[in-house]
């Protein structure tokens, strides 16, 4: 375990989960009215956030997870994702879409978990490896 308690994965998970309801307000879900907020926690213990951003040309919209991954890469430093947290404005349990599973696979740590957040609290927890088994990844290009 890390010496710095603020880097403890469970503490980070709780803090990120609490941040998601306020972020849902920033989602741009003009067409679906289905707001989503996501956090990715990297192996260095930092949380990066994203919300869905839709577009009048519907396929040009971006998912919350996609934007959270973009924030992680933009921040520089660690790139291995240990947790992905997802909250929906409907308070439904949401799992990442197929395209986002592929995006997460690019950066997922071995024991990466997807955590659903409801009411600012972590609820269901799913090993990422079960969401996209036998994924095509960077090692396939080596
Ligand atoms: N959406 C996400 O942002 N993440 C998910 O995991 C599922 C779906 C967004 C895409 C679109 O803006 C809206 O939710 C409805 O599909």
Image (cartoon, rainbow, N blue to C red):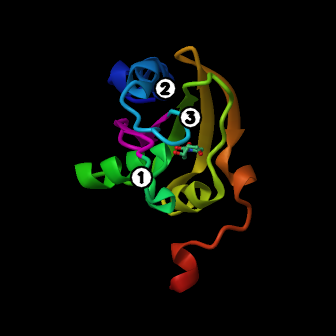
Provide the residue span drawn in magenta.
36-53
Helix, strand or loop at label 3? It is: loop
Question: 90 above or below 134?
Answer: above
- Whether residue 64 can be seen here: yes
Write the residue at 37% across / 19% down: 5
Q: Residue at x 33, y 49 (%)?
A: 72
Q: Earlier in the sequence, mark 3 or mark 2?
A: 2
Spot occupied by residue 1 in the image (x, y as percentages of width and height): 46, 29
Mark toward the viewer: 2 or 1: 1
Mark whose residue sits in front, 3 or 2 = 3
**Identity of the residue drawn at 61% across and 24% down:** 90
Mark 3 = which residue?
34
- Residue in front for this viewpoint, 116 or 130: 116
Q: Could you say where residue 133 lies in the image, as x and y percent from the top left?
A: 74, 61
Give the SS element for disc 2. Answer: helix
Q: State how far apart marks 2 and 1 are (Cα).
A: 30 Å
Checking the image for residue 68, the label placed there is none
Residue 43: in magenta span: yes
Residue 55's tag is 1
Using the rendered view, name the quadrant where residue 88 is placed: top right
């Amino acid at each position: 375990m890390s010496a710095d308690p603020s880097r403890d994965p469970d503490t980070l998970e709780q803090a990120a989960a609490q941040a998601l309801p306020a972020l849902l307000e920033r989602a741009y879900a003009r067409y679906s009215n289905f707001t989503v907020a996501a956090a990715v926690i990297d192996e260095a213990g930092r949380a990066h956030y994203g919300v869905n951003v839709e577009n009048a040309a519907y396929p040009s919209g971006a998912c919350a997870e996609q934007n959270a991954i973009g924030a992680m890469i933009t921040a520089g430093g660690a790139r291995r994702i240990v947790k992905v947290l997802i909250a929906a404005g409907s308070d439904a349990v949401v799992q990442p879409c197929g395209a986002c599973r592929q995006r997460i696979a690019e950066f997922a740590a071995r024991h990466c978990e997807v955590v659903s957040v409801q009411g600012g609290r972590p609820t269901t927890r799913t090993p990422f490896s079960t969401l996209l088994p036998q994924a095509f990844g960077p090692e396939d290009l080596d």
